[in-house]
Amino acid sequence: MAMRNSRFLLFLLAGLLLLGLAVWSARTLPTSEGRPFDGQQAYADVVTQVAFGPRTPGSPAHAQAIAWIRAELEQAGWQVAVQETTVGGHPIRNILASRSDEPPQVILGAHYDSRLLADRDPGPGQIEPVPGANDGASGVAVLLELARSLPEDTVPVWLVFFDAEDNGQIGDWEWIMGSRVFAASLTVRPQAVVIVDMIGDADLNIYYERNSAPDLAAEIWGQAAALGYREQFIPEYRYSILDDHIPFLDLGLPAVDIIDFDYPYWHTTADTPDKVSAESLQVVGETLWHWIVGLRE
């Protein structure tokens, strides 16, 4: 009887182990059917980026971030290309990911660089670079997790990681250099361009941005409300922001900036992962996941 019970327990434990592995795989590995967006994984991606160091253009951390983003996208089954050029003596490297050669219906964008100087820091930190946990890494993290989790049969989507967004008013740098270069080279006309920037704030308050296309914003904010995220996506206007959506608006494309600009650590050395939450990343990522999947219906 003891031997029989031992064998039964071994079979039971083996079965539970296999079940656990299956559940883990369903949550973490990309499949043709997709999987739920995982805010915890997105938060881990924020931590990874900050651990590289400030991703200031031309730095070793910047190069490391490019290689890592590319590897994560390719592992998730996306085709990746790097657009390389120079503007005003500054090298620009935008990262483009797609699943097929079809023209995109949606472009999702975020900047991956971080600012050279923490010039809003209240002390001597003003001469140090910004860690960029929320301002940069949070948007990248959401795009990467969408790359892993979106079903393959969604409408055609491009994911674009913009360089040189965040160094305006420092020397001869300008704002949104990477997205301007990318938009100028665009030969397709997507139905929507969505930028995510500074969306990891633990106290998340995302208002309508005044420059954004109102119909597209209402559509996305409506999706957030349907998921129970009305407190985080607030359908009221508050800011007018120069961000990576502007070059696409200049082309006459519907574009929206999803940004929480009520962030006291913006452009300071305190923009670190402890100011970011997996829950906020989940709110934004899950909203975009459902909005994109809903476009195929």
Image (tube, helix red, strand yellow):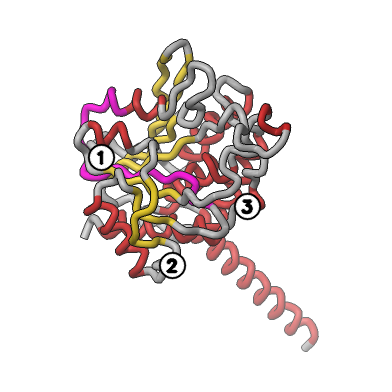
Q: Earlier in the sequence, mark 1 or mark 3?
A: 1
**Quarter-wise, where is residue 13 in the image?**
bottom right
Residue mark closest to the camera, 1 vs 3:
3
**Residue at numbered disc 1:** 104
The 10 Å Cα crowd at callout 2, few under 14, some 14 to 19, many 20 or more, is few
Q: Amino acid at mark 3?
A: Lys
Q: Secondary structure at mark 2?
A: loop
Q: Which mark is residue 251?
A: none
The 10 Å Cα crowd at callout 1, few under 14, some 14 to 19, many 20 or more, is many
Who's the residue at 53% across and 52% down the image?
A: 200
Magenta includes 192?
yes
Q: Amino acid at mark 2?
A: Glu
Q: Amino acid at mark 1?
A: Pro
Q: Earlier in the sequence, mark 2 or mark 1?
A: 1
- Per the model, the C-alpha gap separating discs 1 and 3 is 34 Å
Residue 137 placement (x, y as % from top left): 54, 42
Residue 16 placement (x, y as % from top left): 62, 72
Q: Nearer the viewer, residue 93 or 128?
A: 128
Q: Secondary structure at mark 1?
A: loop
Which region is colored magenta?
183-200
Q: Is residue 19 above or below residue 134?
A: below
> Left or right: where does residue 189 sit relative to residue 175?
left
Residue 44 shows in this picture: yes
Who's the residue at 43% across and 53% down the image?
A: 149
Residue 25 shows in this picture: no
Who's the residue at 29% across and 38% down the image?
A: 100
- Per the model, the C-alpha gap separating discs 2 and 1 is 31 Å
Q: Which mark is residue 231?
A: 2
Q: Which residue is the extreme one toward the right?
A: 2
Residue 226 placement (x, y as % from top left): 33, 69
**Quadrant of the image containing the C terminus:** bottom left
Badges 1 and 3: C-beta atoms under 8 Å apart? Answer: no
